[in-house]
Image: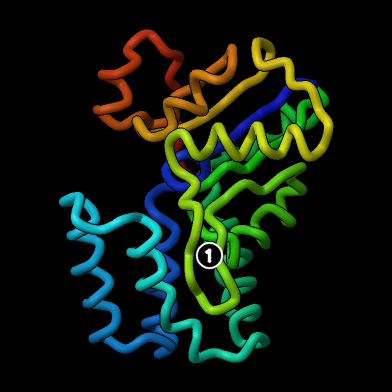
Amino acid sequence: MELACFDFDGTMIRGDSIAAYLKGALQKKLISPAEYAAVGWHTARYFLGLESGNRVKTRALQFTRKLTEAQRRELDRDFALNTLLPRLYPGARARWEQHRREGKKLLLVSASTENYMRFVADALQADALLCTRMLPDGTVTDNCKGEEKVRRIREWLGAQDIRADFAASFAYGDSASDLPMLRLTGHPVQVNPRKKLRKAAPDMEAVHWENP
């Protein structure tokens, strides 16, 4: 079976989805300005190597603990359908549908959290969503980044009893943390690549997708 593995943030859309999620929650007054500022402080510590991705995302999503299950579902669904999907690069959508016509298994492999990514995956009719897991209490586990993406792909293949033809498969990513997934396939594609990725793999195919 041939695969088409897509990173999401920076690859299928511009920017970081969890930042947009928090901004939307702030506008809806679901998170206070103080809580919002605190997330920024913890994010800075993450980039300095002082906090883990799991911890920062857990801190960012703490406000959801105050919401009912119905409120969380409405927030996440609305964000996915009305904020994220309209931001999809036309080039990403076209390549996704091309691979569907070719009969490839479509995998959405993202470090973003499953609370809202599940609605994106449903709308795109993905064959699998492999993303950062989130417990009911808002705790984030298994940050799906770097080598974890490869582990999750292989885990899914094993659970589905699918033997992948990696040489004929495609993968799309924008950052150096996507390199393990990109190098897993015979057709890796850098999308609007960041400098660190381009420097690490200068000979890898690169495409530039933009919104109209």
The structure residue drawn at horizontal position 62% and vertical position 43%, both measured from the top left corner, is 108
Left or right of residue 169: residue 212: left
Rendered location of residue 20, percent (x, y):
41, 65
Q: Where residue 6 sits: x, y (%)? A: 58, 36
Where 33 sits versus 131, above or below?
Answer: below
Residue 118 rendering spot, x and y as whole percentages: 66, 60
Does residue 71 sit above or below 182 in this rendering?
below
Q: Residue at x 74, y 56 (%)?
A: 122
Q: Name the residue tied to disc 1.
A: 83
Q: Is residue 91 visible?
A: no
Q: How many marks?
A: 1
Residue 105 against residue 41 in the figure, above or below? above
Residue shown at the point (59%, 65%) measured from the top left: 116
Query: Is 84 situated left or right of 4 in this image?
Result: left
**Residue at (31% x, 55% y) in the render:** 52
Front-lying residue, 192 or 74: 74
